[in-house]
Amino acid sequence: MSPAGFDSATHVTIEENQDAFTLALSQDETGERGYLILQCSINPPSSADTAAGLDTYCLLDQDGAVQYGGVTRAVLEDGLLTLSLMSEASGELGVDDGTDTIVLAVPPLDADRVAEALRRIFTYGNPGRRPDLTGI
């Protein structure tokens, strides 16, 4: 998911437009040193979304990887975001051991906003594809 060296997020962007709700975590202002984007639609999944497996949240990284679902557990504790991934998601996002931990090096207010955004994103869509949440 995160490239070698991307182990902390110093910038948080949360946006909502007519199509999607998005949380972007990056190591610098431009995202050139690495980023992870988590998003969900603002509309309920359609039957076409469900048929295509797009009825859940989505993760994207700076290498162009895109993964719908695949997070089995998300933990936000003591400024650390840890995502446990299914093997398919690990492969797609380049996470060797199936677990990605990102230090949230952001002010407490931003960390609270991240928790709220993660809750909204990970509870979107198909209940069978939602991860277990701790601290979120």
Image (cartoon, rainbow, N blue to C red):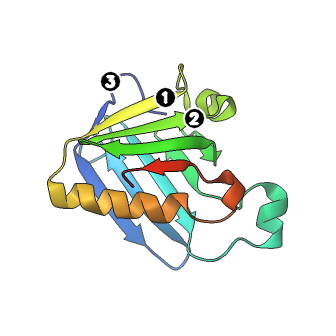
Pointer 3 or 2: first along the chain: 3
Q: Quadrant of residue 79?
A: top left
21 displayed left or right of 85: left
Residue under label 1, please give it.
Answer: 99
| Mark 3 closeness class: few <14, some 14–19, many ≥20 residues within 10 Å | few
Q: Quadrant of residue 108?
A: bottom left
Amino acid type at image mark 1: Thr
Residue under label 3, please give it.
Answer: 5
- Residue 51: horizontal and vertical position, in percent? 85, 60
At mark 1, the secondary structure is strand
The disc label shown at residue 85, or none: 2
Pointer 2 or 1: first along the chain: 2
- Discs 2, 1 touching: Cβ within 8 Å: yes
At mark 2, the secondary structure is strand
Amino acid type at image mark 2: Leu
Gap between marks 3 and 2, in whole Å? 19 Å
